[in-house]
Amino acid sequence: MSELFIGLMSGTSLDGVDAVLARFPGPQGAALEVLGHEHQPFEPALRAELLALNSPGENEAHRCALAGNGLARAYADLVRRLLQAHRLAPGAVRALGAHGQTIRHRPGEFDGCGYTLQLLNGALLAELTGVDTVCDLRARDVAAGGQGAPLVPAFHRALFGRSDAQVLVLNIGGISNISVLEREGQSLGYDCGPGNCLMDFWVQRHRGQAYDADGAWAASGQVLAKLLQRLLDEPFFARPAPRSTGRDLFNPDWLAARLGDATQARPEDVQATLLELTAQSIADCLSPGAEPDAELLVCGGGALNGRLMQRLQALLPQQRVLSSAARGLPPMQVEAAAFAWLAQRFVQRLPGNLPAVTGADGPRVLGALHPA
């Protein structure tokens, strides 16, 4: 069995696709080496359609099917680039793990089971790449009574966990989620709230930019205290773990319903407030259980936002806020590497979830296979 796996990730930020080629030299994924990384922004039409499909609309079934095809083609392009860059034939890769694009996340609702829906035509991806494709990685956890999210804490434990210290791993994509890795081997994890999704929406609306580079625009504004409190009054922030969320909740309509008198404020002040919401909701999650001097390793696009990193350090003065790059894996590679790890777990028929994190009835092998 080859030790090479590919991980493919497109998250709630909708900024594009990340792909990594990973080697697992140790048993059961105890070690990882990223051999290559590729990133490709979404084509504007595909991004717009994926964003629109986060909300109910006309002819959804047809549009979802075509968007899943488009996403498979975008994923396949990155797989080809990785293989060409490393002069590998598709058969040299044991399997790829592909996340797909989440457009609905409603675990436990409606009928007691609920669902989580990630768009991706896995059969087409296997056909286009010639690599065994493992996808639909959240559904089994939901079927077992879990949230289906977050899935990365198990990977964080394998990669960053220490026996002599607590480690905190924070992923800030469209949504922020935290992994608390205790020295005894126990792990907790849950979604904190919005990561970049509201900030990205606001800067695109007012400045036509995909994101606020380094948080510079937010840094030019002033936090609106009344607006911040209205945002923090959202009941989700008071829910105990296990908990997960997505654009189903934190979206432009949610923000518009809470702006109130801030509709007359300077846009940069609203942006500063949205950044503070992200930082404050993360700090509120961590403050009760974080040990003094614990490392907080930040990954995802939020790790590249200098202003957000500054606010996190200010709100968590007893912790050391670091980019995951300080511990060997650059921020934009971590989640894609996690899905390479989940593909390896599937191939070895090993559980990929942590029931203490997701609330599932027990460990489960995650994913569905489309053989090449």
Image (tube, rainbow, N blue to C red):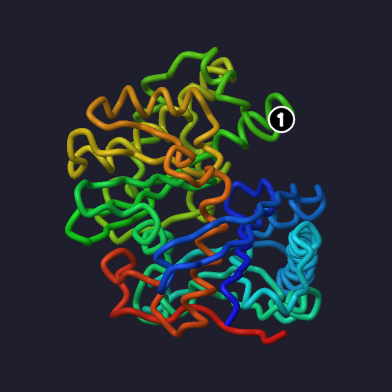
Q: Residues within 10 Å of mark 1 (few under 14, many from 20)?
A: few
Q: Residue at x 18, y 41 (%)?
A: 288
Kindly state the secondary structure of the residue where label 1 is placed: loop
Q: Is residue 352 shown left or right of residue 288? A: right
Q: Nearest the camera: 159 or 129? A: 159
Res. 62 visible in picture: no
Find residue 132 and report its horizontal and vertical position in percent.
67, 81
Q: Residue at x 39, y 41 (%)?
A: 297
Find residue 65 and report its horizontal and vertical position in percent.
75, 73
Circle 1 is placed at which residue position? 209
Q: Residue at x 78, y 55 (%)?
A: 46
Q: Quadrant of residue 86?
A: bottom right
Q: Is 172 placed above or below 341 here?
A: above
Residue type beneath disc 1: Gln
Q: Is 50 placed above or below 234 here?
A: below
Q: Nearest the camera: 82 or 50? A: 82
Q: Residue at x 71, y 24 (%)?
A: 207
Look at the image and tell me in which quarter the N terminus lies: bottom right
- Total marks drawn? 1
Q: Is 126 placed above or below 80 here?
A: below
Q: Is residue 316 shown left or right of residue 327? A: left
Res. 308 visible in picture: yes
Find residue 237 and report its horizontal and vertical position in percent.
32, 45
Q: Is residue 160 shown left or right of residue 347? A: left
Look at the image and tell me in which quarter the C terminus lies: bottom right
